[in-house]
Image (spheres, rainbow, N blue to C red):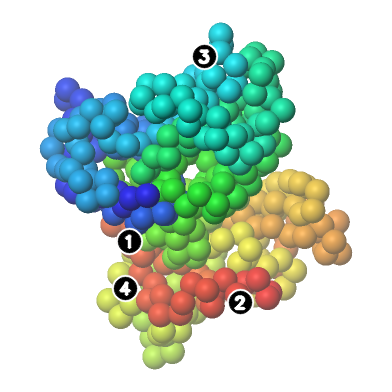
């Protein structure tokens, strides 16, 4: 196992600056997801760590050793790609032990190492099969086994679940979480799927335009997004973002955003909070059926256990959810006016110009999460 660090890493392709400057420190044994939309630089970052791309400038360290000038074979890493890249003419067993052949490991050691990986990934009944005889999930486990058998310092995964159906992705997510818990190898995982990142990661590195936006735990990113990009990108359904104006009075702050009038205590925002702001509201913090605010329902989307409700309030669009077993849920219709309330303690406020968070965030994230869960 080993820590990973990027120091002032820059990557330029011709006239295009892919990574302006990246500083990222991944602790030994962490499971870190590089998360962001297509073109944000996450795969380029992983490829530089793997040695498949060279940084234009800056340094990359694995286990304290500079590796940015070393070839991939000298970095003691193992990588699993989006495509499984299995050898079709080899059996499962032969595919898994292939790296041992390339590294010159004595053949006498192969059976014990293969048996350990096969047991770990539940591949014992499949060892004699060829890849074409396997399901997508089984092929993915073989690809993981081929990487794991090397016992690398760092495990790199580039969107390994994107080719699987939804049910199998959920199953493989759980397997990867359990696998990391058991082996503890430092893992860097690239994905554009926030559900994968939120459920699997120790910490998440959110990227956009080649710039690291926030690097924190899943809870911190969800409950304390550092800026407007993170706030809008993380969360399903997405956070409602409404432009507004902030004023200060003797009782705290008054925010007018769309048709909303929010009164926030002094402890909510920084003392130097700006005047022009964007207010962010998570769907679970908009409560239907009571409150002084009113909105007109645009769309009701039943999903089974709950309904997603889109509403218009003073020209602003709000998104909330309501549990299906709540009596009000059966009565909601498009075009209907409905009262609603906002959980002020969980209101996010951002500078409209810079996008930076204006909340003081003195309360610990765990306390906020506990409050929400209790509600």
C-alpha gap between disc 1 and disc 3: 48 Å
Residue 108: x percent and y percent?
48, 28
Identity of the residue drawn at 69% across and 57% down: 321
Asked if the residue under mark 2 is in contact with the one under mark 3, i.e. CB atoms within 8 Å, the reply is no
Mark 1 or 4, closer to the camera:
1
C-alpha gap between disc 4 and disc 3: 58 Å
C-alpha gap between disc 4 and disc 2: 25 Å
Residue 257 tag number: none
Residue 37: x percent and y percent?
43, 38
* Local SS, label 3: loop
| Residue 166 horizontal side relative to residue 143, left or right | right
Q: Residues within 10 Å of mark 2 (few under 14, many from 20)?
A: few
Q: Earlier in the sequence, mark 1 or mark 3?
A: 3
| Residue 39 horizontal side relative to residue 108, left or right | left
Q: Which residue is mark 3?
A: 87
Mark 4 or 3, closer to the camera:
3
* Local SS, label 1: loop
Residue 257: x percent and y percent?
47, 64
Q: Which residue is mark 1?
A: 356
Q: Is residue 67 above or below residue 204?
A: above
Occupied quadrant, residue 260: bottom right
Q: Earlier in the sequence, mark 3 or mark 2?
A: 3
* Local SS, label 4: loop
* Local SS, label 2: helix
C-alpha gap between disc 3 and disc 2: 51 Å
Identity of the residue drawn at 21% across and 43% down: 60
Q: Which residue is mark 2?
A: 371
Query: Going by the picture, which residue comes out furthest to the top?
Result: 89
């Amino acid at each position: 196992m080993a820590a990973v660090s990027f120091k002032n890493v820059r990557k330029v392709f011709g006239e295009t600056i892919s990574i302006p400057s990246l500083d990222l420190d991944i602790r030994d044994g962490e499971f870190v997801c590089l998360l962001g939309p297509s073109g944000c630089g996450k795969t380029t970052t992983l490829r530089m760590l793997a040695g498949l791309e060279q940084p234009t400038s800056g340094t990359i360290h694995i286990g304290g050793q500079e590796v940015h000038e070393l070839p991939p074979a000298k970095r003691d890493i193992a990588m699993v790609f989006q495509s499984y890249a299995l050898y079709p003419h080899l059996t499962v067993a032969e595919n898994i032990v292939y790296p041992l052949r390339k590294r010159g490991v004595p053949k006498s050691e192969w059976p014990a190492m293969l048996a350990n990986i096969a047991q770990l990934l539940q591949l014992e009944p499949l060892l004699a099969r060829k890849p074409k005889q396997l399901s997508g999930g089984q092929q993915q486990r073989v690809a993981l086994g081929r990487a794991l058998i090397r016992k690398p310092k760092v495990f790199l995964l580039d969107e390994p679940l994107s080719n699987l159906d939804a049910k199998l992705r959920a199953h493989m997510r759980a397997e990867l979480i359990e696998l990391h818990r058991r082996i503890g190898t430092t893992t860097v995982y690239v994905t554009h799927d926030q559900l994968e990142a939120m459920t699997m990661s120790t910490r998440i590195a959110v990227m956009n335009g080649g710039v690291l936006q926030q690097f924190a735990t899943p809870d911190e990113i969800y409950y304390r997004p550092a800026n407007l990009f993170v706030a809008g990108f993380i969360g399903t359904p997405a956070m409602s973002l409404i432009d507004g104006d902030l004023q200060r009075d003797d009782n705290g702050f008054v925010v007018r955003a769309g048709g909303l009038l929010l009164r926030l205590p002094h402890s909510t925002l920084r003392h130097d909070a700006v005047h022009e702001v964007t207010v962010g509201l998570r769907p679970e913090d908009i409560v239907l059926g009571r409150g002084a605010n009113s909105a007109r329902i645009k769309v009701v989307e039943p999903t089974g256990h709950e309904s997603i409700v889109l509403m218009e309030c003073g020209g602003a669009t709000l998104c909330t959810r309501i549990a299906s077993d709540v009596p009000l849920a059966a009565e909601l219709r498009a075009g209907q006016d409905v009262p609603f309330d906002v959980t002020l303690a969980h209101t996010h406020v951002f500078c409209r110009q810079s996008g930076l968070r204006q909340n003081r965030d003195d309360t610990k994230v765990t306390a906020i999460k506990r409050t929400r869960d209790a509600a």
